[in-house]
Amino acid sequence: MKIRNLHVIVLLMLIIGCNKESLVPVPSSGINSFPEGTLPVPSISKPPMEGIYLATTDATIFGDTMILKWNHSGILFTCKNGKHFIMNAGYLDSVILIQGYWRDGYSDATGLCNMSISGPEGGNDILTGKPSANIILRGAYGANSEAPDQSIMLQYIRPFSQKVKSNNFYILGHRAGGRNSDRLPVSENSIAMVKFTERLGTTGIEVDPRISSDGVAFIYHDPDINTRLTQKGLLAGDVSAYTWLQLSSFVKLIHGERIPSLEEVLTFAIDSTELRFVYMDMKSAEAVPVVIPIQQRAIQHAKDKGRDIIILMGIPGTDVLNALMSSLDYRNVPSLCELTVDDVRMVNSKVWAPRWTLGIQNDLVQQMHNEGRLAVCWTIDSPNWIRNYLDQGIFDGLVTNFPYVVAYHHYIQE
Amino acid sequence: MVMVFLSVLVYSQEGDSAKVRLNHYTLTIGAGWTHYINNLEMGGQNLQKDYAGVSLKFFWEPEHRLSLGLETGYYKLFMAKGQLTDNTTGQVDRSVIPLLFLLRMRIIENVHLGIGTGVAFITNKTVGGKQKVSTETISLSNFELSGAYIYPLSKHWLVGGEVKLFHFGNTEDNMYSIQATCAVRL
């Protein structure tokens, strides 16, 4: 190849490489297209459906086994290889209908899917709340928005193990449940993401509080307004330089949502989700005195509502640690400390959260357990490392960008 | 962008058969019209996009087709005024001072093409939402494409015109400018 041609190719690659990544579109039909007369699946029917399923047809792209786990909004099927199904369910007569879409967390692949459980194949038992060992889901999946045409059949193998059921393990979604770079249909650090994330298998979230120039705490990851996080608009530069009114009025997140205040996020998590853990990863030390009363109000609100949810101030660095320690009664501020175990003890954090690259550290985690504290690890995404940490570690939770992968490896444990 | 520079460098080492010049330096000033390419997804209505802009360039022109230089300038990108969103009025001004490293190559007699990259200092002034806020952003991934016609009036003085397109990476702003230029060969 002539060197001049090579230069042209390199130039084209550079131009193409500068294009922004698009989101993976949610297939346009499939959700909420149940036949008329379909009723919501009753609560008593959900536990008998949950468990480990064997994929018994040619649906090899999803692997051999799947986990079926109900969440606040519907059903998550999750596979070993990062593929997962976000589904809604209802029943008509004795048939349980399940519809939605599947996605590959590591690529753009997606498609519609519908399945059903007939009465004789488990529907009758499930609808009366009885466990059934003979549940069979039959249906089809497709590619993108095309009608599903590839058959899929799942056979129930077993329920979740006693170890899984008795272990109060936290699957913590990063950036309120998912990152923009994973091309989810809602923006990271938004109310919409807090609502959506349970569908990915999370049981808790990590959020990123900052404060505006007029002292309002909001959640937003980056220090500046940029097109990675927001629609291109009139504002630019340091996000904390703006007032809350300016941020609310002039900035929209990448999928059109408003930047939420921290108080809105906490209230939504308490009132409208089943999330059990909120980890506020403080992005500025100046935000600490603003966040403490918001945290206290949220904890009281959760208590009033009878919600079992932990709301913690994250301590990612010494600046936040010092800011926290400058407040009165800092040892009673529920916190999560990413620093050393000595720092954890000094501020009496409820949770120690080391970076995953520091290793499994079972001896230190056990020390935390012995002191009545929890330990979670951040931010772990590789399927092999996730499995490794779940098999060999004794952490109480993992922060991840791929909660469905953590969910698979957690729920499949025997 | 580095590969583009390397590509240009390869070509530029070819001898300039059209004209043998001495090693020299030039200082160029330019002024003209700028136009902001409106790609705002929010608040793009009521946008003033056309302004005057100025530039200053310093070039080293060795005995090759290639010239190396630095460019700076001042460009107002846009001003939005009035009803900025459904429920908010105000005024937003955005301006930029680029500081770019330039490569320029003479293609044919008096006609030059150039590319540049470097930093840009972007200022955003917002009045609205009950406060006036000014922020400075340093954008690191920026580039410029330009085409120029430069006519020598004398041994030391040159005049011409230039069209250039800018991209400022941090804010993803794009603008083009058409300028008259005057250069002195030092």
Image (cartoon, rainbow, N blue to C red):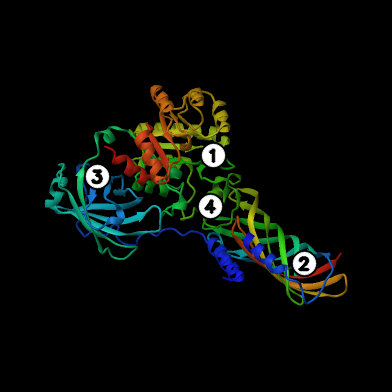
Q: Of the residues shown, which amino acid type is indicated by label 1?
A: Lys
Q: Quadrant of residue A212?
A: top right
Q: Of the residues shown, which amino acid type is indicated by label 3?
A: Ile
Q: Nearer the viewer, residue A240 or A170?
A: A170
Which residue in the structure is indicated by mark 4?
A: A249
Residue B168 image offset from top left, x and y in percent: 63, 59
- Which of pointers 4 and 1 lies earlier in the amino acid sequence? 4
- In 3D space, how far apart are the residues under numbered discs 3 and 4 (Cα atoms)? 47 Å
Which residue in the structure is indicated by mark 3?
A: A52
Query: Which of the numbered marks, if any, corresponds to residue A283?
Result: 1
For discs 4 and 2, the disc positioned in front in the rendered view: 2
Which residue in the structure is indicated by mark 2?
A: B30
Horizontal side of B110 relative to A173 (left or right) equals right
Horizontal side of A112 relative to B8 (left or right) equals left
Residue displayed at 46% across by 60% down? A22
- Is label 3 on the same chain as label 4? yes
**Mark 3: which secondary structure?**
strand
Location of residue A135 with respect to B29 vertically, above or below:
above
- Which of pointers 3 and 4 lies earlier in the amino acid sequence? 3
Pointers 3 and 2 in contact (C-beta within 8 Å): no
- In 3D space, how far apart are the residues under numbered discs 4 and 2 (Cα atoms)? 38 Å
Location of residue A76 with respect to B158 vertically, above or below:
above
Q: What is the chain letter for disc 1?
A: A
